[in-house]
Image (cartoon, helix red, strand yellow):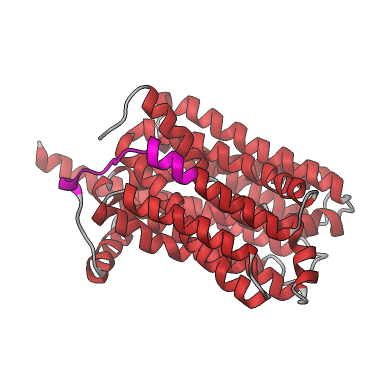
Amino acid sequence: MEPGGRSRRELLIVLGLLSAFPPWSIDMYLPGLPGLTRDLHTSAAPAQLTLTACMAGLALGQLVSGPLSDAYGRRRPLLVGLVAYAGASAACALAPNIWSLVGLRFLQGVAGSAGVVIGRAIVRDVWGGRDAARVFSILLIVVGIAPIVAPIAGGLVLQVGSWREIFVALAGVGVVLFLLALFRVPESLPAGRRHGGGLGSTVRVFRHLAGDRTFASPAAAFGLGFATLFAYISASSFVLENVYGLSPQSFSLVFAANALAMVFAAQTSSWLVGRTGPEHLLRIGLLALAAAGAEVLAVAALHGRLAAMLVGLLVVVGACGFVIPNGTALAMAEHGDVAGSASALLGLLQFGLGAVVAPLVGVAGSRSGLPMGIVIASSAVLALAVTVTLGRERRARAIPEASRAR
């Protein structure tokens, strides 16, 4: 049943909360990492693996949840994923040692991925074309705010408990979202449109999507846009504090300002997309991203001034507010019949590329901004080049087909 009016607004609120699963799952317990390390009698490296495990679960879980939602509908896999998320979070609170926590964090990520991947598929089911781009922009606003709010919420929990209570709180989030989904998320994929199931069918769908330029071009922009964002998130604290001498408090203000820039850009995109279309906004975002990425690289290579670095990073993060939602909408626009699988591939690109670039930005140690500049600039320029090249080929192929149709 397709929602309308007030039901759509309520659905949008729930989808926004589901889209924030990654930052809540990853960022909320960051303030508790030192205490976790002490309580479980471990070192920083194994404790950091709990972050990696959750991110890997978020990436790989989407390859399961997305195709399942194409075969069995959106509601059942979503509700099962939310129950599993609440259970895995509660189990994390009871973890007796670091290695059991690493495994449970992977399961938590797998379960949480259902909310992310199926949420995108529901948007494609309910909204189409420019409306979908507008909705994805609104969801990105939530995603942009969540990394600011989540660590603060984790810090508040630590005032009354330990890192274990943070996972209890996440279990509570899972329960609340389950109830919201149960009563406010209708089935958006009718039985007559469901298909797939089984490994062979899933692989065939993935192969078709990867070879389809209507998917591959905007998906590349989406994935590489996230790669620049992950490079910034992974390296900016080291670069701005160790290289440029900012205090942790000053860095927090810079990080918040950049997050607000992405929120503002996403909001602007949602206003403009009805007039200009997602293709135009995607090109604007990619051009700004490539130019700012080149500027960040030049400043890092030439040991430029702090102000120049801050401006470059602000534009990089802000440009993602145009690239990510419009890339998402365009990638899924022509693939409503396999929206779950298309959403799963986007999720794999998002977290897979994030996992690749995170270690690359630190190859020169914590006192050099050059690796960050190289990764951001190369990802941004590659995103622009791939989009322009595949877009030109797509238009060239469309002309003869249009002529034959006439």
Q: Which residue is drawn at 90% across and 53% down?
A: 245
Q: In which quarter of the image is the C terminus?
A: top left
Q: Which of 358 and 389 is in front in this view?
A: 358
Give the magenta part as a residue range. Answer: 177-193
When asked about the image quadrant of residue 404, the answer is top left
Q: Nearer the viewer, residue 333 or 150?
A: 150
How many numbered dots are placed on residues in this image? 0
- Name the spot of residue 274 as percent of width and height, x first: 41, 25
- Residue 333 visible here: yes
Q: In this view, does 255 lie to the left or right of 144?
A: right
Compared with 121, 224 (above or below) is: below
Q: In this view, does 139 lie to the left or right of 31?
A: left
When asked about the image quadrant of residue 64, the answer is bottom left
Q: Residue at x 50, y 34 (%)?
A: 138
Q: Quadrant of the N terminus?
A: top left
Compared with 328, 8 (above or below) is: above
Q: Which residue is drawn at 69% across and 60% down?
A: 164
Q: Which of 405 and 132 is in front in this view?
A: 132
